[in-house]
Amino acid sequence: MWQRAVEDTGLEQETPSTRPSSAAPSDRMQLEASRRLMDVLTQVHVELVTRGNHRALFERLLTLMLEETRSEYGFIGEVLRSPEGAPYLRTYAITNIAWTDELRAQYAMNASRGMEFRNLQSLFGTVMTSGQPVLANAPTSHPRASGVPSGHPPLRAFLGVPFKVHGELVGMVGMANRPGGYAEDLIEFLQPLLTTCGIITHAWRSEQSVKERARELQAKNEELGRALQQLRDTQKQLVIQEKMAALGSLTAGIAHELKNPLHFINSFAGLSEEFTAELARSVDSHRSRLAPEASEGMGTVLGQLQQSMAKVREHGHRATQIINGMLMHSWGSSEPRVAVSLNTVLRESLQLAFSGFRAKVPEFELGLQEDYDPEVGEVEVVALELSRVFINVVDNACYALHEKKKGAKDGFSPRLEVRTQARGEWVEIRLRDNGTGIPHVRLGKVFEPFFTTKPAGEGSGLGLSLSHNIIVGHHQGRLRVESVEGEFSELIIELPKRAPEG
């Protein structure tokens, strides 16, 4: 059998004079060796099924192979192929024969994950390229020998045997320096071991293939999951947009219908105040002709009438603000987004908001800390809408600071911190005040329409809702509030630098 195998390789064979004769062992010794071999192989098969640690199994098989052949060192490895199709060896188990500190360190680092050998012009390379055994009891004179590196332990004899699965070369074993050299009958003796090596390698490859397929399926599932979630989010967004469009049309219609009668209410409230004031002056000019009781009664009625007209005018004005806010909510953003200097828009809006609040509260003072990141540069936005957001936020901050100042003891200094920062393809804007803050239970409602933390009559509850609509709806950004009641409030705005295509 071995003779035919060597002849089929077409390799140069050693002459009988250089090949040691195969001393047939006694029947008892042969049976004992076969029994040891089968015992270990049985244990290996059991461990393959129960544990599956293929490297540990190959270590046991290598130890068994070296003991039964009385070889000094050897290896068991898998034959793989490079992208170009050239075979190479990756070891599963290998004897440590490192002879320098550098090689010992390399062995310690790589042995557990497999060492690679790619020299095909060698004895083991011949096994990989031919798929046939190579037996060399005089390696230095073998036509395919490539020698050994300086310092390498002597190579006096070599036996390399391939193992296959379904006719495909999957690996090989190699051993060296058996006393007296190697004989052909060893190949037959090692067949159960080679078959087991093939089974383990095939199982390992199958396991890795299954794991790789599982990873691919998991990646596909995750990709499909993301696509499905994106589709659901898009569907939800479309539904919300349709509902908001319908609600916006309804709101706009109602607001327009209310605007005309409200205009008359406000106008006639103003006229009524003027007429009441004129009537009061007329009564005062004729007060000497009236009886004291009548004069006092008319004065009381006129005073109450003036107060009532003032309340009508005040609440009419607030109703006008609410209706204007409803109309702004119902309007979509028809203006194109253009690249503008975000820092400039914020700085100008800050000045406008502070000036507007000072016009209402002349004594208000504010410590302003500004930090504009020049890397922010230009951002594609609707500048008018963004300015509206900044003015509304700064006005709210000034209101909270003023309220805290009124109720605080001496020593409180109103402070507003404004900061921009570039974050890759996004920019971040932070506006933080040390005012009254927002109760934790109310934080989740601050962006709801008509919700306000201000006392009744002092806010429409649409400012932050409109700001959220502009930042999130029109600019595909993000908006959130952080606050601790009595300490601070901070509004964080995140905007993409570029408008999404389409």
Image (cartoon, rainbow, N blue to C red):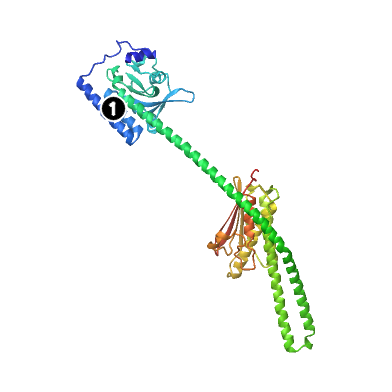
- The residue singled out by tag 1 in the image is 64
Residue that extends furthest to the bottom in the rendered view of this protein: 291
Label 1 crowd (10 A; few <14 / some 14-19 / many >=20): some
User: Measured along the vertical axis of the image, is residue 182 above or below residue 64?
Assistant: above
Where residue 62 appears, as percent x and y from the top left, is 32, 27
Q: Quadrant of the C terminus?
A: top right
In the visual, does 335 lie left or right of 143?
right
In the image, residue 78 above or below residue 479: above
In the figure, 480 relative to 86: above or below? below
Q: Which residue type carries mark 1?
A: Leu
Any part of residue 155 in sight:
no
What SS does tag 1 mark? Answer: helix
In the rendered image, residue 466, in percent from the top left (x then y), is placed at 64, 57
> How many labels sit on residues?
1
Instruction: Look at 57% across and 60% down and name the residue there.
Output: 445
Q: In which quarter of the image is residue 64?
A: top left
Q: Is residue 303 left or right of residue 193?
A: right
Q: Is residue 259 left or right of residue 87?
A: right
